[in-house]
Amino acid sequence: MASAGIDDVRDWILGRHPERDSLAPDENLIESRLVDSLSFVELVYAIEAASGVEIDFDSIDIQDFQTLSAIEKAFFVTA
């Protein structure tokens, strides 16, 4: 079950791509060009706003941002 926060991130991505009406949890956001180098920083801020977690730009692991599933696991799942 997806958290409300990851739904906010999905909505943010889909809002930037009105031609899309859905986004699979395992779709690679970078390879599919849904997130590019210009929108990546905005994505980080959207994740911070939705999760309440501050992301350190100096220690970013790009793998944590490639899919909605990876974002959810890295920033929304609490142990």
Image (cartoon, rainbow, N blue to C red):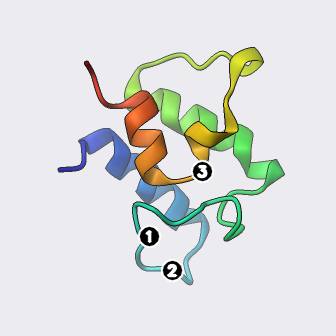
Q: Please report the residue visible at 39 percent of the width from the left and 40 percent of the height from the top.
A: 72
Quick one: label 3 or label 1, which is nearer the N terminus?
1
Q: Quadrant of residue 18?
A: bottom right
- Helix, strand or loop status at disc 1: loop
Residue 20 numbered tag = 2
Residue drawn at (36%, 45%) of the image: 6
In this view, 16 is above or below 51: below
From the image, which quarter does the C terminus lie in?
top left
Q: Is residue 59 left or right of residue 54?
A: right
The label on residue 66 is: 3
Q: Residues within 10 Å of mark 1 (few under 14, many from 20)?
A: some
Distance between the alpha carbons at the discs numbered 3 and 2: 18 Å
Question: Could you say whether the residue bearing mark 3 is in a helix, strand or loop?
Answer: loop
Question: CA–CA distance between discs 3 and 1?
Answer: 13 Å
Q: Nearer the viewer, residue 59 or 8?
A: 59
- Disc 1: which residue: 23
Q: Assess whether mark 2 and mark 1 are in contact (beta carbons under 8 angstroms).
A: yes
Which of discs 1 and 2 lies nearer the camera? The answer is 1
Which residue in the rendered view is the most extreme toward the bottom? 19
Would residue 61 appear left or right of 1 to someone viewing this image? Answer: right
Q: Amino acid type of disc 2?
A: Arg
Residue 48: % across, % down: 51, 27
Amino acid of disc 1: Leu
